[in-house]
Image (cartoon, rainbow, N blue to C red):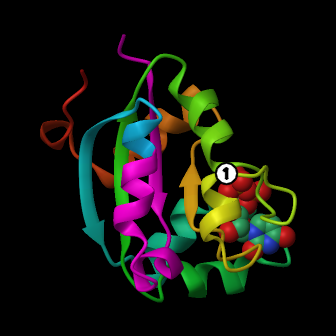
Amino acid sequence: MLNDFTFAFIKPNAVKNSNIGPILSMINKAGFRISAMKMIHLTISQAESFYAVHGEKPFFRDLVKFMSSGPVVAMILCCDNAVEEFRKLIGETDPARAGEGTIRKLFATSLQMNAVHGSDSNENAIKEAAFFFSEFERYYS
Ligand code: UDP
Ligand code: MG
């Protein structure tokens, strides 16, 4: 089904720490199909747009700086109930509160550098996928 996808990226800390492979492996083992993927180094203004919803938060400036500090690996991931299932796989935003065996528990280096992003709703998955990928780069399956 078209809506059964989510948008995700591996954040700069996990890319720098050579954790792309282990994270992709966990994503595949959890039953997600990777239907689009690319490595991209966001500019400050692209990171500001992506996280615009957090524009008024005290952590926004530092988050934008971090998110543009190195490349991310952006993906569209498909499986039934993808948004919810992926949020379960990554665990809570704060790695100290993330469950055992979740991606954030295993690979986060701080609350900010929490290794991965996952969309929080179908509506945002659609918007975020379109932010990173053009129509011809997407392979829903
Ligand atoms: N973040 C932060 N400080 C905070 C809360 C969040 O640096 O106090 C960062 C963290 O990288 C998080 C991102 O901002 O993943 C977006 O925050 P959100 O609340 O949307 O969490 P998420 O949806 O990523 O779990
Ligand atoms: Mg969020």
Q: In the image as oriented, which residue stretches furthest toward the top?
A: 1
Q: Secondary structure at mark 1?
A: loop
Going 25% across and 52% down the picture, which residue do you hit?
37
- For the C terminus, the image quarter is top left
Q: Is residue 111 visible?
A: yes
107 relative to 35 in the view: left or right? right
Q: Can you identify the residue that label 1 sits on?
A: 101
75 relative to 128 in the view: left or right? left
Q: In the image as oriented, which residue stretches furthest toward the left?
A: 136
Mark 1 nearby-residue class (10 Å; few <14, some 14–19, many ≥20): few
**141 versus 128 height, above or below:** above
**8 versus 114 height, above or below:** above
Q: Quadrant of residue 21?
A: bottom left
Going 65% across and 71% down the picture, which residue do you hit?
108
Q: Nearer the viewer, residue 115 or 71?
A: 115
Which residues are the magenta region? 1-26
Going 57% across and 47% down the picture, which residue do you hit?
118
Q: Nearer the viewer, residue 91 or 68?
A: 91
**79 versus 107 height, above or below:** above
Q: Residue 23 in the image: x percent, y percent? A: 44, 58
Q: Quadrant of ligand 1?
A: bottom right
Q: Is residue 55 visible?
A: no
Q: Is residue 25 magenta?
A: yes
Q: Is residue 10 magenta?
A: yes
Q: Residue 64 in the image: x percent, y percent? A: 60, 79
Going 76% across and 57% down the picture, which residue do you hit?
93
Q: Residue 61 in the image: x percent, y percent? A: 70, 84
Amino acid type of the residue that numbered disc 1 sits on in the rendered structure: Gly
